[in-house]
Image: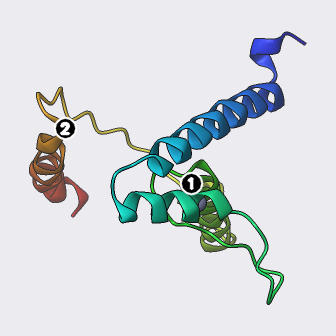
Amino acid sequence: MSKTNNFFVKYQESRFVEEKARVRLIEQLRHGYSNEARDLAHRMSICGDRRETSDNSIYCRQPACPRCKRAYARNQARAIQDWMADAQRSDLSLVTVLLGVADRAGDVPRMCVERRAKLTPLAG
Ligand SMILES: [Zn+2]
């Protein structure tokens, strides 16, 4: 199987790249000029370690942390699987809504609200 078609290899490569970026970010924060930056670097550096007092892991809960991102994605996937456990194929629908091109990222929430308002009469 070629390397580009192997999901596991792609996942491992992606994880490797994310972990390298995480280490770089921690190093930059460690050399930051504020106590908050150094505190954040410490929290990110111990993220994923086991607590001494229990068998649970420590999570820094920072959006830039790939370990927390993966844990969040796992929890979301479990929640969706539980929520959809009794769903039949006929219960599922998929709709793609194209919003258009935003000039600024900050425009996206407004575009979502406007598009939702236009779609609501169709749902009823
Ligand atoms: Zn984290």
Decide if ligand 1 comes within 8 Å of the CB at mark 1: yes
Residue occupying the point 74% across, 26% down: 10
In percent of width and height, residue 15 lies at 70, 37
Dot 2 corresponds to which residue?
A: 105
Q: Secondary structure at mark 1?
A: helix
Q: How many marks?
A: 2
Where is the C terminus found, in terms of image quarters? bottom left
Residue occupying the point 34% across, 52% down: 33
In percent of width and height, residue 90 lies at 58, 56
Q: Amino acid at mark 1?
A: Lys
Quarter of the figure with residue 75 = bottom right
Residue occupying the point 10% across, 49% down: 110
Numbered badge on residue 69: 1
Please determine whether, in this image, residue 90 is positioned above or below residue 51: above
Q: Amino acid at mark 2?
A: Ala
Q: Secondary structure at mark 2?
A: helix
Please determine whether, in this image, residue 15 is positioned above or below residue 47: above
In percent of width and height, residue 87 lies at 63, 66
Residue occupying the point 78% across, 33% down: 12
